[in-house]
Structure formats: structure tokens, C-alpha cells
Amino acid sequence: MEDPQFTVELAGPSPRGAVRLKAVRAVTGMSLWHSGLALDAGTSVLLSEVPFELAGPAARDLRRVGVAVAVRCGACRRTLPEDGSPVDPGPCAGRYFPTAHCQANSLTVCDCYHCTEYRPLPGPAAP
């Protein structure tokens, strides 16, 4: 069972500036010109299908310089809060793993079949 992938996308247009352009470039690897186009558009996907360990720090770095971004879980399509904390443990639309194992969740225990019969799966619910 694989961990869900996350998407970092712009939450709206951001004003250009050398610091913002360089931050987008550092996170995405795009040229400064393409970084500027992405900032102007405001609806671009900057990182797609990356692990949470990459999406969280990238969003934090971009927010630090004033770029409005959102981190969205690829399985349940929920957006993580801006402070980086997990989302509420509401219903997850993830098809292949229980809600408790989504890294976007705040659940700390799991009673899914696999965890009760064998061992806890990796993820936030794992002890």
C-alpha cells in the first residue's frame, strides 16, 4: 500500500518579485521566466504527485516569501491548512487505504482490518 501523493498549487496570483521568483524556481526547477508566468496565472500546479515530505517544506518556503499556495492530498483531494497541521479526520475519499493512513489526517489510531489482524500500516496512525 503506497502513501498518498500531494500536489502544491498556487492559491491565487502573487505579485512578482525577485525573492518570489527565486523561491518558485528553487521549488520547481522552472526558469525565472516560467516562474513569473506561473505567479501571474495564479492557478498553476507547482509540484505534482510528490510525497508529503517534499510538499510540506516546499509550501512553507513559498508562503514564507509571500506566495499563496495550497497543498492538496492526491487521494482524498482535501486541502491541508496553511499552518501545515493535519486536516480534520473526516471522511476520506481515498480508494486504496484507510482514512487513518492518509498523511493529511489528524487521526492517531486505526481500527482497519489490516492493522487489527496483522500490524499497523505506515502513516500517521502507526504507533
Image: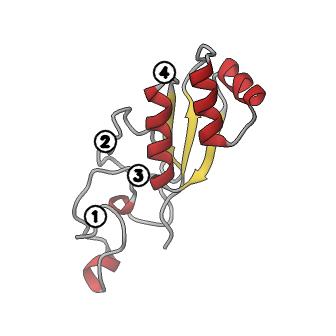
Picture residue at 31% right of the left edge, 42% below the top? 85
Distance from Cα at disc 4 to Cα at disc 3: 30 Å
Dot 1 or dot 4: first in sequence order is: 4
Distance from Cα at disc 1 to Cα at disc 3: 14 Å
- Mark 3 burial class by Cα count in 10 Å: few <14, some 14-19, many 20+: some
Q: How is the image coloured?
A: secondary structure
Q: Are marks 1 and 3 in contact (CB under 8 Å)?
A: no
| Circle 3 residue | 92
Distance from Cα at disc 4 to Cα at disc 2: 19 Å
Position of residue 75 in the picture relative to residue 113 (left or right): right
- Mark 4 burial class by Cα count in 10 Å: few <14, some 14-19, many 20+: some
- For the residue marked with disc 2, what is the amino acid? Ser
Distance from Cα at disc 1 to Cα at disc 4: 33 Å
Task: Give how far across and how far down residue 34 sits, in percent.
Answer: 76, 29
In front: label 4 or label 3: 4
What secondary structure is marked by label 4? loop
Which quadrant of the figure has residue 60?
top left
- For the residue marked with disc 3, what is the amino acid? Cys
Quadrant where the C terminus sits is bottom left
Dot 3 or dot 2: first in sequence order is: 2
Task: Give how far across and how far down residue 114 sits, in percent.
Answer: 34, 79
What secondary structure is marked by label 1? loop
Q: Are marks 4 and 3 in contact (CB under 8 Å)?
A: no
| Circle 2 residue | 85
Dot 4 or dot 3: first in sequence order is: 4
| Circle 1 residue | 125
In front: label 4 or label 2: 4
- For the residue marked with disc 1, what is the amino acid? Ala
Picture residue at 35% right of the left edge, 40% below the top? 84
What secondary structure is marked by label 2? loop
Q: Label for residue 66?
A: 4
In front: label 3 or label 2: 2
